[in-house]
Image: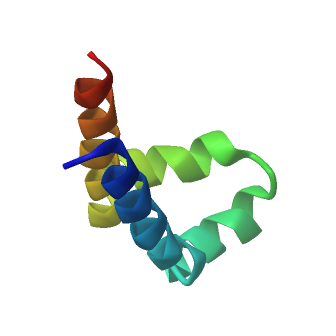
Amino acid sequence: MSRLQVVYAISDILQHCGVCPQRVKLSQKYGSTYSKIDGYCNRECPVGGLLQLQGKELIRERA
């Protein structure tokens, strides 16, 4: 997969984050404390896991 394809895949995945009810709830609870929101997204959210895999793909492409 080329770098451009990975970037497009990441863009497609991020569209799910805009409508995520859990992200909205955490944003209302913690305001602008993104570390709390990102902690949930990185550790618990399946979409966040997909984003991490795509990010690792970008790193592999660069090396």
Quadrant for the C terminus, please.
top left
Say which of 30 and 9 sits in front.
9
Horizontally, is 45 left or right of 53 in the view? right
Q: Is residue 48 visible to us here?
A: no
* Residue at 42% in and 72% down: 12
* Residue at 27% in and 56% down: 50
Say which of 52 and 57 sits in front.
57
Residue 61, compared with residue 48, is above or below; it is above
Horizontally, is 18 left or right of 1 in the view? right
Residue 32, compared with residue 26, is above or below; it is above
Residue 37, compared with residue 28, is above or below; it is above
Q: Is residue 24 visible to us here?
A: yes
Q: x, y (%) of residue 45?
A: 33, 61
Q: x, y (%) of residue 19?
A: 55, 84
* Residue at 46% in and 77% down: 16
* Displayed quadrant of residue 13: bottom left
* Residue at 39% in and 46% down: 42
Say which of 20 and 4 sits in front.
4
* Displayed quadrant of residue 58: top left
